[in-house]
Amino acid sequence: MRNSLTLAVALTVLAGCASGPDYQRPALDLPAAVSQDSQATSLSRWWTAFNDATLNGLIDDALRHNQDLKMAVARVDEARALVDSSRVSYLPQVDAAVNSSRTRPSHRTASYRPGGPDEITNHQATLNVSYELDLWGKIRRANEAADATLLASREAQHAAQAAIAAQVAQTYFQLRALDKKVDLAMKTLTTRDEALKLQQARFKSGVISSLDLARAESEREAIVAALPSLSAAQQKTERALALLAGRSPKAIAEGKITRPQADAAWPTLPTVPSGLSADVLNQRPDIRQSEASLIAANARVGEARAQYYPSISLTGAFGSASESLSKLFSGDALMWNVAGSLVQPLVGLKRIDAQVNQAEARKVQQQANYVKTVQMAFKEALDALTSRSAAVDVQMAQSRRLQSLAQATKLAKLRYQAGQGSYLELLDAERNLYSTDMERVESDADALTATVDVYRAFGGGWSEGPPSLAAQ
């Protein structure tokens, strides 16, 4: 009894062991946390901070229908099936078997019994059970790797969601900018047409020279020449947005995206996180995915090392056998057997060595990838903050410049009409005003797209999922 108890305790202790190293997050020299702006919008659905119903609808459509996201969801389902398959390894394998045979033994063998039946019928029904004791943690490490792989696939899905949301928002802002540029060009063309008619009349009256008339014609044609490329860019961007939103091929071909009029106000430029925090960056799905892959690689090392140790299996069978089908389940037809096996690798250790080396090399790769991912995350977040700050400064400067040029153009027009200024002076003022107005539209769009980059760099654009395995 004492020996049995000792054996049971020993097996329990061994069952609690797992080969290979337990996961430890790599030590990184992270900057001190910086307090976040209390007015910053929640990162999970950051696009709602722009207060644009059209944008909200487009991103919601993309998150439901985009084909890249559907592939990411399918990969999560695949990883979840792998986890389910791996967890079954913990359970005993139970099989039921029913056999029936009829044989005629040779009369020329030693097993032949003279006077016995020439033909033998045998019926058998058995329940077979087999179970591998996970003393060295091989199955446990395999399950750990499968769980981490599932988490990595989920984070890859989150990363795809974040990327699609950002692409939709930035493409939408680009489309709105092109709408405004086309509208500005068309309005400018109308103004140039009116100016050309006036100059033609003044030329016929001998008030101006042919040079001034040619300049008016040239300015009009410059706008006409710019319109086709603007229109083409507008159509291509509209189709790109339809593709991102998961529209049908017919809808993509039509490329019709319902949106505000060109002269409608821009979406609200929201506030963003005012500083950088390691806790905030931990929301980034690429960091979480990379760490989950490292956890899986670490577990695979333990799984590979467990092959050095013996595998212990228990098997058993319970059933009945009879020559007569009617007596198959009678008491004297019952049969059972119990067996145990221990298999210790002796030959082929070099193969195990190679598998362990391979697993350790993959772990080193994943660890380097994790460190690099964290490094890149901090760089991208800081770059995004810097770019947005610069974009907002440019936007404000362009707005002030546009106001000044509008006033200068107004004065140049008054001077020309009063005969105090040349037509070339007026054309230069109008040309600068048009160019700056176009640049102002671009700067407005740049400030919006730079804000999207900040939200994405800080890990926004996906709903909170299950906790990190490292924290469990």
Image (tube, grey):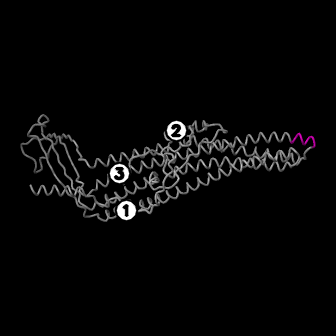
The secondary structure type at the circle numbered 2 is: helix
First of labels 1, 3 by sequence position: 3
Q: Residues within 10 Å of mark 3 (few under 14, many from 20)?
A: many
Q: In this view of the protein, can residue 156 be seen by the observer? A: yes
Q: Farthest residue to the right: give it.
A: 206
| Horizontal relation, residue 207 to residue 61: left or right | right
User: Which dot marks residue 69?
Assistant: none
Q: CA distance from mark 1 to mark 3?
A: 18 Å
Q: Residues within 10 Å of mark 1 (few under 14, many from 20)?
A: some
- Say whether residue 450 is magenta: no
Q: Residue at x 22, y 53 (%)?
A: 133
Which residue is label 1 attached to?
Answer: 358
Q: Which marked residue is nearer to the observer: mark 1 or mark 3?
A: 3
- In the rendered image, residue 389, in percent from the top left (x then y), is placed at 59, 54
Which residue is label 3 attached to?
Answer: 146
Q: Main secondary structure of the magenta part?
A: helix
Q: CA distance from mark 3 to mark 2?
A: 32 Å
| Horizontal relation, residue 156 to residue 3: left or right | right
Q: CA distance from mark 2 to mark 1?
A: 43 Å
Label 1 is placed on what type of residue? Gln
Q: Is the N terminus in the top left, top right, bottom left or bottom right quadrant?
A: bottom left
Q: Which marked residue is nearer to the observer: mark 2 or mark 1?
A: 2
Above or below — where is 217 with respect to 342? above
Which residue is label 2 attached to?
Answer: 61
Q: Give the extent of the magenta segment.
A: 199-206
Label 2 is placed on what type of residue? Asp
Q: Residue at x 85, y 40 (%)?
A: 198
Q: Residues within 10 Å of mark 2 (few under 14, many from 20)?
A: some
Q: Residue at x 34, y 60 (%)?
A: 301
Label 3 is placed on what type of residue? Ala
Q: In this view of the protein, can residue 161 be seen by the observer? A: no
